[in-house]
Image: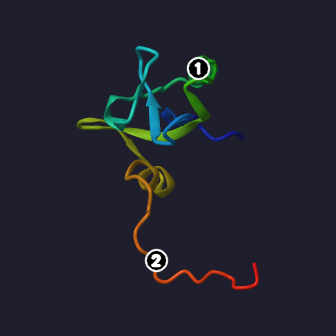
Amino acid sequence: MPRPFTPKVITANDLLEGDVIYFTAQDTWTRDLSEAELITDEAEAQLRLLEAEMQNIKIVGAYLADAKAGPNGPEPTHFREEFRRTGPSNYFHGKQEADANV
């Protein structure tokens, strides 16, 4: 038996800057998840994903991500999406030694 459909948002990366972006109901992209379109119908989700993917001169890697309705708009339901929306983890990782034989 298939799993029941859960609400989704469409997310991708900005082609030029690499930022995480979300598809809106107005067929535009935003960096703010709370402005994303929350899609509650499976067939509509697939159609909207196709529409988003057609904007491939602006975006790369569009996909449907699980989300839920929150008080200020969609919210992620999975750790991966929460991590993506907070931005890159480019903090200092300690000394990176280069290979002297290269």
Residue at (45%, 35%) from the top-left corner? 21
In which quadrant of the rendered view does residue 56 lie? top right
Image location of residue 66, percent across then percent down: 50, 41
Instruction: Please tell me whether residue 50 is drawn above or below residue 1 in the rendered image.
Output: above
Mark linked to residue 55: 1
Give me the residue at 46% from left, 16% from top: 27
Quarter of the image that includes the C terminus: bottom right
Q: Name the residue nearer the viewer: 65 or 59.
A: 59
Q: How many marks?
A: 2
In percent of width and height, residue 9 lies at 48, 33
Residue 1: horizontal and vertical position, in percent?
A: 72, 41
**Label 2 CA crowd tier, 10 Å (few <14, some 14–19, many 20+):** few
Q: CA separation, marks 2 and 1?
A: 36 Å
Q: Which mark is residue 93?
A: 2
Q: Residue furthest left?
A: 71
The amino acid marked with disc number 2 is His
Sequence-wise first label, 2 or 1: 1
- The label shown at residue 88 is none
81 w.r.t. 54: above or below:
below
For residue 71, side relative to residue 65 (left or right): left
